[in-house]
Amino acid sequence: MAPTASKKFTREEELLLQDFSRNVSTKSSALFYGNALIVAALPIWIFWRIHQLDITQTQSIILLAVVTLVSTWLIAFAYKNVKFSLRHKVAQSREEAVTKDVFKKLTALEAKKMSRKEKDERVLWKKNEVADHEATTFSIFYNNTLFILLILLASFLVLRSFDSNVNYALSLLGAAGLLALLSTGTK
């Protein structure tokens, strides 16, 4: 039996794999969870002031904390899914503009010294950077808008006759769950 050697990836191969991976950077993950926590916590004010949810009871505090944390995780999950599905579409649509921008920033001396492969790598790196940033910001905007809309519809129309604790739990978990479900779609 021949010994199996584990093949190490080169830095370029790791970067290429990272571009097609669903994993997000630590910075993006912190941004997603921070935004998700803020958006999941905002409805507390609506339920406290409008639906008269008593936030002084221990039972309500525990309910608020658990539902907010679960909703935070579901919203962050949706952010990641939408970002992944948008990143390649944005990269394709911005390719021409990014290429012009990169070549415009190169001086004539740099352009002559660089090989075609180096220029292409710069364009690819910049294109991926722009696509990542645009996909991140659009994912946050799109998911936040949809989440708030779903909460308002659920709490004021569908569940208005329910107790405020039940209304809070069902509308937040329902909106966050539906958001996560919709984010897994392929189209």
Image: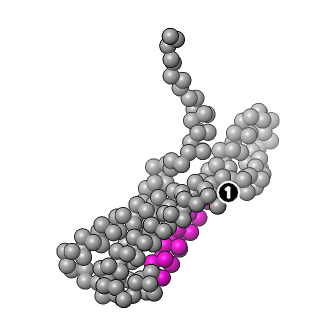
Residue type pointed to by label 1 = Val
Left or right: 113 as drawn, with respect to 5 = right
Q: How many numbered marks are there?
A: 1
Along the viewing direction, whichever of 164 and 90 lies nearer the viewer: 164
Residue 23 sits above or below residue 140 on the image: above
Horizontal and vertical percent position of residue 9: 56, 29
Residue at the outermost top position: 1
- Residue 21: in sight, yes or no? yes
Query: Magenta stretch?
Result: 134-153
Query: Where on the picture, by quarter, is residue 135?
Result: bottom right
Q: Is residue 91 above or below residue 176?
A: above
Identify whether 19 is placed above or below 179. Answer: above
Magenta span includes 9: no
The picture quadrant where one finds residue 10 is: top right
Instruction: Locate residue 125, reporting x and y percent.
Output: 65, 44
Instruction: Residue 42: tell me if it is visible.
Output: no
> Eyeballing the image, is 27 above or below 5?
below
Which residue: 24% across, 70% down?
Answer: 62
Q: Residue furthest left?
A: 58
Q: Is residue 83 left or right of residue 58?
A: right
Q: Quadrant of residue 33?
A: bottom left
Name the chief secondary structure element in magenta: helix
Disc 1 is placed on an element classified as helix
From the top left corner, tell me how far across and down residue 56 is, in percent: 21, 80
Q: Is residue 143 magenta?
A: yes
Picture quarter with the C terminus: bottom right
Residue drawn where x is 21% and y is 74% of the image: 59
Which residue: 39% across, 87% down?
160
Q: Dot 1: few (<14), some (14–19), or many (≥20) neighbours within 10 Å?
A: some
Q: Mark 1 — residue?
A: 90
